[in-house]
Image (cartoon, helix red, strand yellow):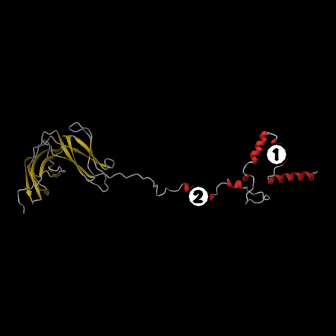
Amino acid sequence: MRTTTITVIAAAVCIAAVGITVPAAAATASDHPTTAASAAARSSAPAARRTPSATTPSSASPSATPWSATATATPSAAAAAKSSTAATAKPSAAAPARTATAKAPAPTALTATPLPLASARATFGSALIHWTKPEGAQGAWVVSRNGTDSLGVGPQSISTTSANDTALVLNHLVRGRTYTVTVTGDLGQGRFASTTVRVGSDQVTPPRALVVTRNDENARVGTVSAAWAAPQVSAGKKVLGYQVTVQQLATGAAPTVVVLAPSARSYTSGELDSTFTYLVSVSAITSSGVGPAAQGSIQIGDSNKLYP
């Protein structure tokens, strides 16, 4: 009896190992609709799930791995490392990392020089703003001032034509008022430099007895000269120097501005183009600023004259 029982159990194990379907079990499953459907579904499953791989060791080896288990195995350490490297790889040359664009440099040697007032009673004046173009400058400059001018216009900004422009005149500045002037590169998007300027003084008269002459060196160039006497100054004030301005009237080019010592009584310009008329202005400088100007104009050269 013991021998028979062991034999039957061994046979059942062998039948299950090779996947043979027992007819009696199939007949029993078909007796119940749900059980029959489950059996049919199991029988229609892909054979790969039930059949050992061709490379699988024989059933005698308990560590044999079916094909289906191999297909769903976790990637090896080498594959995982490769995947991690690909995920953290640097961008290719076709898609470089974005970097911040450096701002255009600020102007250097910025100055704001008050220009002579039109008369001793003038209530407003102008200032020459001048700067040096730095290396790497790009785009036009924007010249801005704060405050309100004599026309009632508030803060103002004026753009130059290009980065090569290095001078601009601000007009209608209220006499005796201090303005802050800022020059910014790259159409206002770059770096900037600032200075202050004050137009006019009520405590000094224009220099007296101004005389303007010319010296024609040849048919192409010449010079202008100016001579004057000291102005009258209010009590407690003294002349700290003189400002001489020479401006070509025809083209509207930026004027030449020179500051001289308080003892100066004359000035001669450098070479100027002939056939143009020049306006010469001389103002006294006190602790209150640049005073009203004495002015005279003269033309260099003579089209009817023969030069050596």
State the residue at coordinates (83%, 46%): 25
- Left or right of 143 on screen, residue 289: left
Q: Say whether marks 2 and 1 touch (CB < 8 Å).
A: no
Say which mark, if any, is on residue 82. 2
* Whether residue 122 is situated above or below residue 226 in the rendered picture: above
State the residue at coordinates (20%, 46%): 127
* Mark 2 nearby-residue class (10 Å; few <14, some 14–19, many ≥20): few
Say which mark, if any, is on residue 26. 1
The x and y percentages for residue 66 are 73, 55
**Badge 2 amino acid:** Lys
Say which mark, if any, is on residue 213. none
- Secondary structure beneath disc 1? helix
Badge 2 or badge 1: first in the primary sequence: 1
- Left or right of 116 on screen, residue 90: right
The extreme bottom residue here reads: 308
- Left or right of 308 on screen, residue 200: right
The x and y percentages for residue 90 are 50, 56
Residue 263 visible here: no
The extreme top residue here reads: 152
State the residue at coordinates (69%, 55%): 70
**Badge 1 amino acid:** Ala
Which quadrant would the C terminus be assigned to in this image? Answer: bottom left
